[in-house]
Amino acid sequence: MTKLNQDFELYQGETKMVTVNVDLPGGTAWTGTGADVIFRASRVTHNGHLVPSLEKKDADITLVNVDGTDDGVRFTILPEETRELVGEYEHETRAVDATGQEAVLALGKMTVKHSHAAVH
């Protein structure tokens, strides 16, 4: 079910809408109804530790219809959330369904490029 290499990039201070399509084994449609979803982007330090830098939770994430069911999630990264970020971050989108089952929906890299205009 995990979609790997879901890499994306944006500039500091830019608005970016991100959609994560969810695929289940065998082509079964995933329904996120009732699921708690979290997106987290973390900086990898020189010693391999992850430092959370950006997080989106349920109120910021909506279920979207990609293939006829609520089989995706969408959220928007706001300009103020990336003004102080620059470089490469590992990201993960995870869901916990109504029964408590956890699933990683997507993994990848988020690259935030430096912008002279966005830095104040």
Image: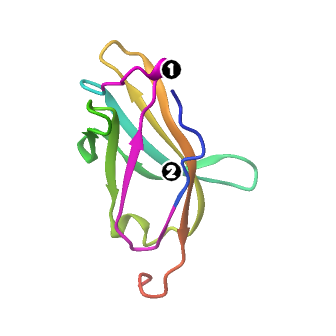
Q: What stretch is highlighted in magenta?
A: 9-31
Seen at 42% across and 87% down, the residue is 117
Camera-nearest residue between 102 and 54: 102
Q: In this view, does 66 lie to the left or right of 118?
A: left
* x then y, percent, for residue 45: 68, 54
- Where is residue 13, by image quadrant? bottom left
* x then y, percent, for residue 70: 27, 32
- Where is residue 73, by image quadrant? top left
* x then y, percent, for residue 85: 50, 67
Q: Mark 2 points at which residue?
A: 41
Type of residue at label 1? Answer: Pro
Q: How is the image coloured?
A: rainbow
* x then y, percent, for residue 66: 31, 39
Residue 25 badge: 1
Residue 80 badge: none
Above or below 12: residue 72? above
